[in-house]
Amino acid sequence: MPLRTPLAPALLLLWVAAALTGCGGYADTSQAFRASLTHGAPEEALLAVNEALGVPSAEMLPAEKQTETPLLLLERATILQALQQYKLSARDFQLADKDLIVLDLTSDTAGEIAKYMFSDDATVYKAPPHEKLLINTLNLLNYLAMGDAQGAKVEARRIVISQKYLEGVTDEKRLSTMALASYLAGFAFEVAGEPEAAMRHYGDAKDAGGVATLERAVKTLAARSGASDPRLKVWTEGVSADSVDRDAADVLVVVQTGMAPFKQSKRLPIGAALVAASDPGPGARLSRQEQRRAQAFAAKGVLKWINYPALRRARLPEGPISVAVDGQAVESGNGLFVSQAVLAEFQRHEGSLIAGAITRMITRAVAGELSGAAANKGSNNGLAGLLVGLAVEGAMAAADTPDTRSWVTLPERIQVARARVAPGQRTITVRHLGRDHTATLDLQPGGWAVVNFSGWR
């Protein structure tokens, strides 16, 4: 029998909102594989992310794409890279990259409505700039680790496209993200036998702030090939071809440690929230009218706090990283502090995130008042109206899940080491936090190899 009471509209809204409760958002979805990777158990992390994707193994793809599928594929690609399953990792990176490009161009009108009525994570996921660039950077690393110079060149060209997306942005933190990408792109073209293109990418890396081993790489390439770039003249002047052993092999070691910050739901008092959402800054801010409405509801005691996606740092032990070939230390240092890029990007948009959370709370408060008024009018019972209003507002508040989506399996930092060594069998040793991790290479005269260590954080 259909509801025929004046409370029916309010009760229906209450039922809809209650049906949306019980979901902790992406922070809950990702907790299992994020924790496993944090504890140095990538195999367990892979099982957890496959479960989130709804597939029994890494070889399989979801039958249907959901809102979070591209992001979960990024997570799985990162975990597969840590497990040295580079071919599958490359496939997942490419699929995620393709879908994220499409999602960035989606108008998502219905999602925008849901964003204000219920939750930000009702919209499609749009990767921030540093994530877009790191997709191609880490996938380029996959191809280099597989010894596929041609595949690496393809990703290098995609990096150039991603960099054009960031053109005009001079922020230091964004530039640092591009430095590692350009450096790896330069290495890809160098080992593919295109020294002039390699030198241009090395010039881009220098412009973006540089990375460890870049100066020596530029000098060696100039001596071997005569390639040059005006931006690198200070390093290449006077370089002699006699200084290079052409039979030596080139070894690049990439070490990924720690875990980048991730988003978690956080309550913020309305007073502090209004200040953060009203101050001038990039992105959307509360209008004067929205500020007055929020203050009015706060004065009534209806609006006391907001729920928004704050950034949380994964606090893991830190320590120096050393790299050696056959027991001999090689030059190494910072490639990219991923955490700095994540934090800088979040700080640009934090005010907008808080403004969106306040807007949703206002929407719920209005819904509660309207429902209470309707119930009061229909039943001539002020208590009934109050209860219904509180119930509707409470149910919608419970249904609000801030958008905690982000690429949570990214490392905190990426370190690079590079050396030219004699051909033959060589042992690479990485020491971090008192533990040694090794890999064995069989190098050909004039050959090259790239080794990635990211299975422990």
Image (tube, rainbow, N blue to C red):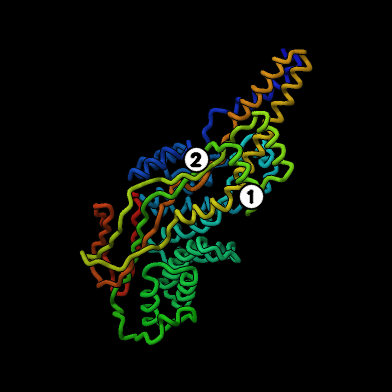
In this view of the protein, can residue 72 be seen by the observer?
A: no
Report the front residue among 218 and 95.
218
Sequence-wise, the earlier of marks 1 and 2 is 2
Instruction: Locate residue 129, reporting x and y percent.
Output: 55, 56
Inspect the image, locate mark 2, and give the three-letter code of the amino acid beneath it: Gln
Instruction: Sort mark 1 into few (<14), some (14-19) or many (20+) by Cα contacts within 10 Å.
Output: few
At x 64% / y 39%, what residue is drawn?
358
- Per the model, the C-alpha gap separating discs 1 and 2 is 23 Å
Looking at the image, which residue sits at the far front?
299
Instruction: Locate residue 102, reporting x and y percent.
Output: 61, 52
* Residue located beneath label 2 in the image: 264
Q: Which mark is residue 161?
A: none
At x 41% / y 58%, what residue is drawn?
142
Q: Quadrant of the N terminus?
A: top right
In this view of the protein, can residue 329 be seen by the observer?
A: yes
Looking at the image, which residue sits at the far left?
327
